[in-house]
Structures are given as C-alpha cells and as structure tokens.
Amino acid sequence: MTTAKTKIPVRIHAMYTSPGHDFKGHHGKPRGRHPVYTRDEIECVAGRGVIGDRYFDYRDNFKGQITFFDWAVLCQMREKYRSVGFNSSSIRRNIVIEGVDLNSLIECEFEIQGIRFYGTQHCAPCYWMDDAVGSGAEEFMTGRGGLRARILSSGNLRKGNACLILQRESILVS
C-alpha cells in the first residue's frame, strides 16, 4: 500500500547561519558573541549540515543538521519582546518557515525545494533564550521552539514560496 504525497504550500521568510556557538558549552560562563548571518540561499549537504553553520560536520548522523522555526511564533515573539529590541536571528534557528505545524514533522521525511529532510525532534529552548531574547522567552518557546532535522539530500534552499512534500496523509497546517 502506498500513501499519496501531501503537498503543502509554505513560505521561507528568513534563513540564518552562524559559524560559532553562543550558548553550547558556555554553562557558567558568558554567552559567546558569534555573528549571525542572514542568507537568501543556503547550501544543505546530506548528512553534514548547512555550509557555514556551526553544526556543519558536528558529528555523524547529528539530529540537528538544520533547524526550522515557525513564522507565526516569531511574529508573536516580535510583539512580546518589541520593547527589548528583539531580533529574529536571536532564536538561532536556520530556517523561518510559514504554513506547516513543525511538530507534526517529527519522525517524518519531507521535501522542500527538492531537498529531503527527516524531522528528528522538537528544538527545545534552553535557559539561554531568556538572555538572547528576553525574560520569559524559554517558557514562551516551550513546545514551539522549532524542529531539528537531518539533511537527507544535498541542494540549495532559497527564501520565498515553496511546497513542502510529505509521504503522509495527516499533517496539520498552521
């Protein structure tokens, strides 16, 4: 029995890379201050990660070779943290996407712009989000911190309208 492909229109609003870790490995020390670069296009390499990002070649079969974040949650954060000068790159996720419930992609293979991904787990926020974004950000992002994924095929991902293709019938559209 085969399952028909589900096609969902999505929009990639923003893409980010950073060459270094600001939080990982900094417990008990100040956060790092590595630059975050805004991209119009990124190169995804199967099994390795995003070229130019801190998790590129991090380790074999790493579950967070690329991260996705929900545009709707980002918009809510912009409103909530406007007074502290919130910058959307502060969330330190690679792709900001609209049109799909990211938690529904956990343990699913999906494709965007010809590149195949496997959703490995929720990208849980850590206590550093309160420092990076503002007080209460970790709690605000709980359950909606994004999606970690493995990259299954190589290619370039670009900002703009796209189609997410999934080999599953039931998916929630946000």
Image (cartoon, rainbow, N blue to C red):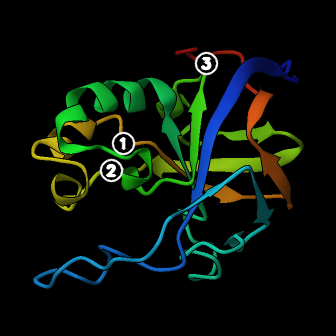
**x 57%, y 71%: residue:** 62
CA gap between label 2 and label 3 equals: 21 Å
Toward the viewer: 18 or 113? 18
Q: Residue 63: give x, y in percent of width and height.
A: 54, 63
Three-letter code, disc 2? Ala
Toward the viewer: 139 or 82? 82
Q: Residue 58: give x, y in percent of width and height.
A: 56, 82
Assign a secondary structure to mark 1.
loop
Contact between marks 3 and 1 (CB within 8 A): the answer is no
**x 38%, y 51%: residue:** 91
**x 62%, y 49%: residue:** 15
The answer to which image quadrant residue 129 occupies is bottom left
Is residue 166 visible in this depiction of the protein? Answer: no
The residue under label 2 is: 124
Assign a secondary structure to mark 3.
loop
Q: Quadrant of the N terminus?
A: top right
Which numbered disc flags the more N-terminal residue, 2 or 3?
A: 2
The residue under label 1 is: 145
Q: Residue 150: give x, y in percent of width and height.
A: 65, 59
Q: Crowding near pointer 1: few (<14 within 10 Å), some, many (20+)?
A: many
Three-letter code, disc 1? Gly
Three-letter code, disc 3? Ile
Q: Which one is in front in this view, the residue at disc 2 or the one at disc 3?
A: 2
User: Is 128 placed above or below 134 here?
Assistant: below
Is residue 89 visible in this depiction of the protein? Answer: yes
Q: Residue 164: give x, y in percent of width and height.
A: 76, 29
CA gap between label 3 and label 1 equals: 18 Å
Assign a secondary structure to mark 2.
loop
Contact between marks 2 and 1 (CB within 8 A): the answer is yes
The residue under label 3 is: 171
